[in-house]
Image (cartoon, rainbow, N blue to C red):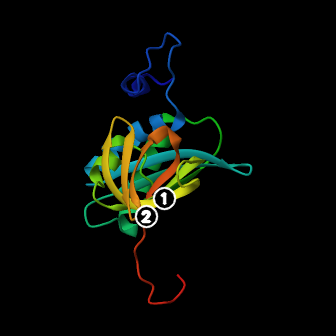
Amino acid sequence: MKEWLKPLFHACGVNFLGNKRPSTAEVAGKIGEPVAQALGLQIWDVRFEKEGSEWYLRYFIDKEGGVRIDDCEAFSRQVDKLLDDADPIEQSYFLEVSSPGVERELKKDWHFQKYIGHKVDIRLIRATQPKKTRDYTGVLAAYAEGQITLTAADGEYSFDKTQTAYVRLHDDFDYGGQNP
C-alpha cells in the first residue's frame, strides 16, 4: 500500500491490525472528497458495482442549484488522476460521474434530514401489515436513529431503515399528459 493512502484508510476506521477494512466505495469517496470541496460540490454517494462482467465506480455529485455536465467533467478529470496515482482498485473498472437525479435515493442520515417535508417513495424488502404492500408514497415527516416516519394520504407509517429496499425522492414532474 502506498504510504500516502494510510491516512485515508485510518479516516475510514482501519487500524492495520486486520480488524476493519474500508470498502472500495469508502476509499474512493475519501479520495474524491477534496476534489468535490475544491469544486464546490458535494459527494452524494459512491458505488462500486458489477454489471455483467464489468465493474463501475460511480460518483454521484450534487451542489446548490443542481449539477451541470461541466461539473461532472471537471470532477471526473481530477478524481481520475488521483485514482490512477493511488491505485486503490485492483481490477479494471469504468469511472462514471453524474448527478443523483430527481428521484435520488436517500441512504445516509444527512440525506433523510435534508429532505424532511418532501414527498418520497419507499419500497420495503417485505410487505408489512396493515396494508400488505411493499410500496408507500407520502411526505417524509421525521427521521431519527434509523426510524423513518411517513405521512401518507391514508395515515402515518413508521419504518426501520433496515426494512427498506430503497427510499427515493418522489418525482412530481408533470409531463403534460405525455410519457417521459
Q: Residue at x 52, y 81 (%)?
A: 180
Q: Nearer the viewer, residue 109 or 76?
A: 109
On the question of residue 6 being in view, the answer is: yes
Category of crowding for the residue at label 2, using alpha-carbon neighbours closer than 10 angstroms: few (below 14), some (14–19), many (at least 20): some
Which callout, 2 or 1, points at the residue further toward the start of the chain? Answer: 2
Task: Kindly report the distance in space between the C-alpha atoms of the residues bearing marks 2 and 1.
Answer: 20 Å
Is there CB contact under 8 Å for labels 2 and 1? no
Q: Which residue is mark 1?
A: 136
Q: Nearer the viewer, residue 16 or 111?
A: 111
Q: Nearer the viewer, residue 24 or 140?
A: 140
- Amino acid type of the residue that numbered disc 2 sits on in the rendered structure: Gly
- Amino acid type of the residue that numbered disc 1 sits on in the rendered structure: Tyr
Q: From the viewer's perspective, is residue 176 above or below residue 84? A: below
Q: Of helix, strand and loop, which one carries label 1? A: strand
Q: From the viewer's perspective, is residue 167 above or below residue 64? A: above
- Image x and y of residue 125, in percent: 59, 46
Q: Which residue is mark 2?
A: 101
Q: Residue at x 44, y 64 (%)?
A: 103
- Image x and y of residue 108, in percent: 39, 43
Category of crowding for the residue at label 1, using alpha-carbon neighbours closer than 10 angstroms: few (below 14), some (14–19), many (at least 20): some
On the question of residue 85 being in view, the answer is: no
